[in-house]
Image (spheres, grey):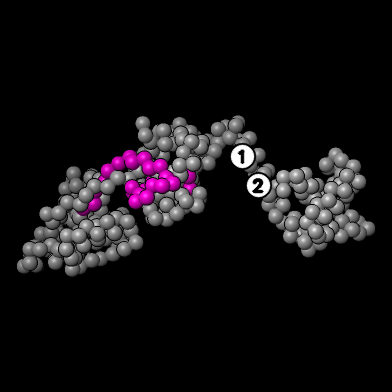
Protein backbone atom coordinates (compact mmCIF):
# COMPACT_ATOMS: atom_id res chain seq x y z
CA UNK A 1 0.00 0.00 0.00
CA UNK A 2 2.92 2.36 0.70
CA UNK A 3 3.53 2.91 -3.04
CA UNK A 4 -0.02 4.20 -3.43
CA UNK A 5 0.03 6.76 -0.59
CA UNK A 6 0.79 9.70 -2.94
CA UNK A 7 -2.11 8.55 -5.13
CA UNK A 8 -4.47 8.60 -2.15
CA UNK A 9 -3.38 12.16 -1.40
CA UNK A 10 -4.16 13.22 -4.96
CA UNK A 11 -7.50 11.39 -4.86
CA UNK A 12 -8.35 13.05 -1.53
CA UNK A 13 -7.51 16.52 -2.84
CA UNK A 14 -9.45 16.02 -6.09
CA UNK A 15 -12.49 14.79 -4.17
CA UNK A 16 -12.37 17.81 -1.88
CA UNK A 17 -11.99 20.24 -4.75
CA UNK A 18 -14.53 18.54 -7.01
CA UNK A 19 -12.44 19.70 -9.95
CA UNK A 20 -9.23 18.41 -11.52
CA UNK A 21 -8.00 21.90 -12.36
CA UNK A 22 -8.40 23.21 -8.81
CA UNK A 23 -6.78 20.05 -7.42
CA UNK A 24 -3.75 20.51 -9.69
CA UNK A 25 -3.30 24.09 -8.46
CA UNK A 26 -3.55 23.02 -4.81
CA UNK A 27 -1.10 20.17 -5.36
CA UNK A 28 1.27 22.20 -7.59
CA UNK A 29 1.26 19.53 -10.29
CA UNK A 30 -0.20 19.49 -13.80
CA UNK A 31 -3.78 18.46 -14.60
CA UNK A 32 -2.60 15.46 -16.68
CA UNK A 33 -0.55 14.30 -13.68
CA UNK A 34 -3.65 14.45 -11.45
CA UNK A 35 -5.74 12.54 -13.98
CA UNK A 36 -3.01 9.94 -14.47
CA UNK A 37 -2.68 9.39 -10.72
CA UNK A 38 -6.45 8.90 -10.34
CA UNK A 39 -6.54 6.40 -13.23
CA UNK A 40 -3.66 4.47 -11.68
CA UNK A 41 -5.45 4.30 -8.31
CA UNK A 42 -8.67 3.21 -10.01
CA UNK A 43 -6.78 0.45 -11.84
CA UNK A 44 -5.15 -0.77 -8.60
CA UNK A 45 -8.54 -0.90 -6.87
CA UNK A 46 -10.35 -2.26 -9.94
CA UNK A 47 -13.12 0.32 -9.68
CA UNK A 48 -14.19 3.77 -10.88
CA UNK A 49 -13.84 6.52 -8.29
CA UNK A 50 -15.06 9.62 -10.15
CA UNK A 51 -17.82 10.53 -12.55
CA UNK A 52 -16.83 13.31 -14.95
CA UNK A 53 -19.27 16.10 -15.79
CA UNK A 54 -19.21 19.59 -17.26
CA UNK A 55 -18.57 21.20 -13.87
CA UNK A 56 -15.77 18.88 -12.80
CA UNK A 57 -15.85 15.51 -11.08
CA UNK A 58 -18.07 13.83 -8.48
CA UNK A 59 -17.56 10.66 -6.49
CA UNK A 60 -19.07 7.33 -7.46
CA UNK A 61 -20.50 5.08 -4.74
CA UNK A 62 -17.14 3.33 -4.40
CA UNK A 63 -15.36 6.65 -4.51
CA UNK A 64 -17.52 8.02 -1.68
CA UNK A 65 -16.79 4.94 0.41
CA UNK A 66 -13.06 5.30 -0.13
CA UNK A 67 -13.13 9.05 0.49
CA UNK A 68 -14.84 8.55 3.87
CA UNK A 69 -11.97 6.42 5.14
CA UNK A 70 -9.21 8.40 3.45
CA UNK A 71 -10.64 11.60 4.94
CA UNK A 72 -10.49 10.05 8.43
CA UNK A 73 -6.90 8.98 7.82
CA UNK A 74 -5.71 12.40 6.68
CA UNK A 75 -7.68 14.07 9.47
CA UNK A 76 -5.87 11.85 11.99
CA UNK A 77 -2.54 12.82 10.45
CA UNK A 78 -3.42 16.52 10.71
CA UNK A 79 -4.40 16.05 14.36
CA UNK A 80 -1.17 14.18 15.08
CA UNK A 81 0.91 16.94 13.51
CA UNK A 82 -0.91 19.56 15.57
CA UNK A 83 -0.39 17.58 18.78
CA UNK A 84 3.29 17.11 18.03
CA UNK A 85 3.68 20.81 17.37
CA UNK A 86 1.99 21.64 20.68
CA UNK A 87 4.06 19.05 22.52
CA UNK A 88 7.32 20.40 21.17
CA UNK A 89 6.41 24.01 21.87
CA UNK A 90 4.85 23.59 25.35
CA UNK A 91 5.67 20.05 26.40
CA UNK A 92 2.00 19.09 25.99
CA UNK A 93 1.14 15.42 25.88
CA UNK A 94 -1.68 13.15 27.08
CA UNK A 95 -1.75 10.75 30.02
CA UNK A 96 -4.73 8.42 30.53
CA UNK A 97 -5.14 6.84 33.98
CA UNK A 98 -7.58 4.10 34.96
CA UNK A 99 -8.49 3.82 38.66
CA UNK A 100 -11.39 3.01 40.96
CA UNK A 101 -13.14 5.97 42.56
CA UNK A 102 -11.93 5.07 46.05
CA UNK A 103 -8.30 4.57 44.94
CA UNK A 104 -8.50 7.87 43.09
CA UNK A 105 -9.51 9.71 46.24
CA UNK A 106 -7.20 8.05 48.77
CA UNK A 107 -4.13 6.98 46.75
CA UNK A 108 -3.89 8.70 43.35
CA UNK A 109 -4.57 12.34 44.27
CA UNK A 110 -1.26 13.07 46.06
CA UNK A 111 0.74 11.61 43.16
CA UNK A 112 -1.41 13.49 40.67
CA UNK A 113 -0.90 16.77 42.49
CA UNK A 114 2.90 16.42 42.35
CA UNK A 115 2.83 15.37 38.69
CA UNK A 116 0.68 18.32 37.63
CA UNK A 117 3.00 20.69 39.47
CA UNK A 118 6.02 19.36 37.54
CA UNK A 119 4.28 18.79 34.18
CA UNK A 120 1.50 21.39 33.98
CA UNK A 121 1.04 21.03 30.20
CA UNK A 122 0.35 17.29 30.16
CA UNK A 123 -3.34 16.68 29.51
CA UNK A 124 -4.68 14.11 31.99
CA UNK A 125 -7.78 11.94 31.58
CA UNK A 126 -9.13 9.83 34.46
CA UNK A 127 -11.32 6.76 33.85
CA UNK A 128 -13.00 5.59 37.07
CA UNK A 129 -14.04 1.94 37.15
CA UNK A 130 -13.25 -1.35 38.87
CA UNK A 131 -9.84 -3.00 38.88
CA UNK A 132 -11.07 -5.64 36.43
CA UNK A 133 -12.28 -2.97 34.01
CA UNK A 134 -9.02 -1.03 34.40
CA UNK A 135 -7.05 -4.15 33.46
CA UNK A 136 -9.23 -4.55 30.38
CA UNK A 137 -8.64 -0.92 29.38
CA UNK A 138 -4.89 -1.43 29.79
CA UNK A 139 -4.94 -4.48 27.51
CA UNK A 140 -7.08 -2.59 24.98
CA UNK A 141 -4.63 0.36 25.21
CA UNK A 142 -7.43 2.73 26.20
CA UNK A 143 -5.53 3.85 29.32
CA UNK A 144 -1.77 4.26 29.78
CA UNK A 145 -1.52 3.57 33.51
CA UNK A 146 -3.80 1.70 35.90
CA UNK A 147 -3.87 2.08 39.68
CA UNK A 148 -4.93 -1.39 40.81
CA UNK A 149 -4.49 -4.11 43.36
CA UNK A 150 -1.65 -6.52 42.66
CA UNK A 151 -2.74 -8.49 39.55
CA UNK A 152 -2.80 -12.29 39.53
CA UNK A 153 -0.99 -12.38 36.20
CA UNK A 154 1.71 -9.92 35.15
CA UNK A 155 2.78 -11.43 31.81
CA UNK A 156 2.22 -8.29 29.74
CA UNK A 157 2.35 -5.82 32.63
CA UNK A 158 4.89 -4.12 34.81
CA UNK A 159 3.46 -3.56 38.32
CA UNK A 160 4.92 -1.00 40.71
CA UNK A 161 3.50 -1.30 44.26
CA UNK A 162 3.17 1.98 46.14
CA UNK A 163 1.17 1.07 49.25
CA UNK A 164 0.00 -1.81 51.41
CA UNK A 165 -3.66 -1.89 52.40
CA UNK A 166 -5.65 -4.00 54.83
CA UNK A 167 -9.36 -4.73 54.97
CA UNK A 168 -11.25 -4.33 58.22
CA UNK A 169 -14.73 -3.81 59.65
CA UNK A 170 -15.50 -0.58 61.49
CA UNK A 171 -18.52 0.74 63.36
CA UNK A 172 -19.42 3.48 65.79
CA UNK A 173 -19.11 2.80 69.51
CA UNK A 174 -22.79 3.70 69.87
CA UNK A 175 -23.81 1.02 67.38
CA UNK A 176 -21.83 -1.66 69.22
CA UNK A 177 -23.25 -0.59 72.58
CA UNK A 178 -26.83 -0.69 71.28
CA UNK A 179 -26.17 -4.05 69.64
CA UNK A 180 -24.97 -5.55 72.94
CA UNK A 181 -28.09 -4.26 74.71
CA UNK A 182 -30.58 -5.83 72.31
CA UNK A 183 -28.77 -9.05 71.40
CA UNK A 184 -28.01 -11.87 73.84
CA UNK A 185 -25.73 -13.70 71.38
CA UNK A 186 -22.18 -12.32 71.72
CA UNK A 187 -21.19 -13.60 68.25
CA UNK A 188 -21.05 -10.48 66.08
CA UNK A 189 -21.01 -12.59 62.92
CA UNK A 190 -24.57 -13.61 63.79
CA UNK A 191 -25.95 -10.35 65.17
CA UNK A 192 -24.25 -7.39 63.49
CA UNK A 193 -25.29 -5.88 60.16
CA UNK A 194 -22.28 -6.09 57.87
CA UNK A 195 -22.26 -3.41 55.18
CA UNK A 196 -20.20 -4.31 52.12
CA UNK A 197 -19.70 -3.37 48.49
CA UNK A 198 -21.35 -5.47 45.78
CA UNK A 199 -20.13 -8.94 44.81
CA UNK A 200 -18.24 -7.70 41.73
CA UNK A 201 -15.91 -5.54 43.81
CA UNK A 202 -12.38 -6.94 44.22
CA UNK A 203 -12.19 -6.10 47.94
CA UNK A 204 -15.55 -7.77 48.56
CA UNK A 205 -14.36 -10.89 46.78
CA UNK A 206 -11.14 -10.89 48.79
CA UNK A 207 -13.09 -10.70 52.07
CA UNK A 208 -15.59 -13.34 50.90
CA UNK A 209 -12.75 -15.71 50.03
CA UNK A 210 -11.21 -15.19 53.48
CA UNK A 211 -14.53 -15.94 55.20
CA UNK A 212 -15.07 -19.04 53.07
CA UNK A 213 -11.56 -20.30 53.82
CA UNK A 214 -12.19 -19.92 57.57
CA UNK A 215 -15.80 -21.21 57.52
CA UNK A 216 -17.23 -17.87 58.63
CA UNK A 217 -20.80 -17.04 57.67
CA UNK A 218 -22.37 -13.59 57.98
CA UNK A 219 -26.05 -13.63 58.87
CA UNK A 220 -26.92 -10.04 57.95
CA UNK A 221 -25.32 -8.37 54.91
CA UNK A 222 -26.29 -4.98 53.50
CA UNK A 223 -24.79 -4.07 50.10
CA UNK A 224 -23.81 -0.42 49.63
CA UNK A 225 -22.78 1.17 46.34
CA UNK A 226 -19.71 3.20 47.38
CA UNK A 227 -17.01 3.22 50.05
CA UNK A 228 -17.85 6.80 50.99
CA UNK A 229 -21.40 5.72 51.81
CA UNK A 230 -20.11 2.74 53.78
CA UNK A 231 -18.09 5.09 55.97
CA UNK A 232 -20.94 7.56 56.43
CA UNK A 233 -23.45 4.80 57.24
CA UNK A 234 -21.05 3.38 59.82
CA UNK A 235 -20.70 6.82 61.42
CA UNK A 236 -24.46 7.16 61.95
CA UNK A 237 -24.79 3.67 63.42
CA UNK A 238 -26.37 1.67 60.60
CA UNK A 239 -23.98 -1.22 60.98
CA UNK A 240 -20.39 -2.39 60.54
CA UNK A 241 -18.69 -1.32 57.31
CA UNK A 242 -16.07 -3.27 55.40
CA UNK A 243 -13.42 -0.69 54.49
CA UNK A 244 -9.71 -0.27 53.87
CA UNK A 245 -8.14 0.49 57.23
CA UNK A 246 -5.72 3.05 55.82
CA UNK A 247 -8.61 5.03 54.31
CA UNK A 248 -10.41 5.52 57.66
CA UNK A 249 -7.31 6.27 59.73
CA UNK A 250 -8.57 9.78 60.73
CA UNK A 251 -11.92 8.37 61.93
CA UNK A 252 -10.14 5.66 63.92
CA UNK A 253 -7.69 8.11 65.48
CA UNK A 254 -10.43 10.49 66.63
CA UNK A 255 -12.57 7.54 67.84
CA UNK A 256 -15.45 8.39 65.51
CA UNK A 257 -15.18 4.78 64.37
CA UNK A 258 -13.62 1.70 65.89
CA UNK A 259 -12.58 -1.67 64.54
CA UNK A 260 -14.86 -4.57 65.33
CA UNK A 261 -13.41 -7.08 67.84
CA UNK A 262 -13.80 -10.06 65.50
CA UNK A 263 -10.57 -11.90 66.39
CA UNK A 264 -9.63 -12.09 62.72
CA UNK A 265 -7.00 -10.27 60.70
CA UNK A 266 -7.22 -9.96 56.94
CA UNK A 267 -3.92 -10.32 55.07
CA UNK A 268 -2.53 -7.07 53.71
CA UNK A 269 -2.61 -6.40 49.96
CA UNK A 270 -0.49 -4.32 47.60
CA UNK A 271 -1.82 -1.55 45.38
CA UNK A 272 0.25 0.11 42.73
CA UNK A 273 0.56 1.37 39.18
CA UNK A 274 0.42 -1.06 36.26
CA UNK A 275 1.53 -0.38 32.69
CA UNK A 276 1.99 -2.48 29.59
CA UNK A 277 5.65 -3.45 29.34
CA UNK A 278 5.86 -1.94 25.85
CA UNK A 279 4.60 1.45 27.10
CA UNK A 280 6.82 1.85 30.14
CA UNK A 281 9.36 4.12 28.45
CA UNK A 282 6.84 6.34 26.63
CA UNK A 283 6.48 10.00 27.54
CA UNK A 284 4.77 10.92 29.88
CA UNK A 285 4.27 7.41 31.34
CA UNK A 286 7.97 7.19 32.20
CA UNK A 287 7.92 10.57 33.96
CA UNK A 288 4.84 9.69 36.01
CA UNK A 289 6.32 6.37 37.15
CA UNK A 290 9.64 7.98 38.06
CA UNK A 291 7.80 10.49 40.23
CA UNK A 292 5.68 7.90 42.02
CA UNK A 293 8.63 5.62 42.73
CA UNK A 294 10.87 8.27 44.27
**107 relative to 229, above or below:** above
Assign the magenta stretch its main secondary structure: strand
Q: Quadrant of residue 50?
A: bottom right
Q: Which mark is first along the chain, 1 or 2?
A: 2
- Relative side of 162 to 282, left or right: left
Q: Which residue is mark 1?
A: 83
Residue at horizontal 49 percent and vertical 41 percent from the top: 279
C-alpha gap between disc 2 and disc 1? 10 Å
Q: Which residue is mark 2?
A: 76
- Relative side of 267 to 73, left or right: left
Of 277 and 54, nearer the camera is 277
Closer mark to the observer between disc 2 and disc 1:
2
- Residue 104 position, x and y percent, is 37, 47
Task: Locate the C terminus and report the quarter of the image it occupies.
Answer: top left
Instruction: Report the span colored magenta.
Output: 143-168
**Badge 1 density bin: few <14, some 14–19, many ≥20, Cα 10 Å:** some
**Badge 2 density bin: few <14, some 14–19, many ≥20, Cα 10 Å:** few
Which residue is situated farthest in the left direction here? 184
Residue at horizontal 74 percent and vertical 57 percent from the top: 66
- Relative side of 33 to 139, left or right: right
Q: Is residue 157 magenta?
A: yes
- Residue 144 position, x and y percent, is 48, 45
- Residue 162 position, x and y percent, is 33, 40
Q: Quadrant of residue 209?
A: bottom left
Is disc 1 placed on a helix, strand or loop? helix
Of 30 and 259, nearer the camera is 30
Q: How many marks?
A: 2
- Residue 238 position, x and y percent, is 21, 62
Is disc 2 placed on a helix, strand or loop? helix
Amino acid sequence: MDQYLPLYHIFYTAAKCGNISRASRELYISQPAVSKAIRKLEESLNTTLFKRNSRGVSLTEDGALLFHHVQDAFSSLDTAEQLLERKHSLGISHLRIGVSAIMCKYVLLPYLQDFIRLYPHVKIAISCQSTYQTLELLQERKVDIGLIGSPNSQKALDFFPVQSIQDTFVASETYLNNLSLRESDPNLFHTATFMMLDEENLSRQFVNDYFKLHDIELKNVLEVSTVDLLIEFAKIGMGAACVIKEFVRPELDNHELMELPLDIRFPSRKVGFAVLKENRELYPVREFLELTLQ
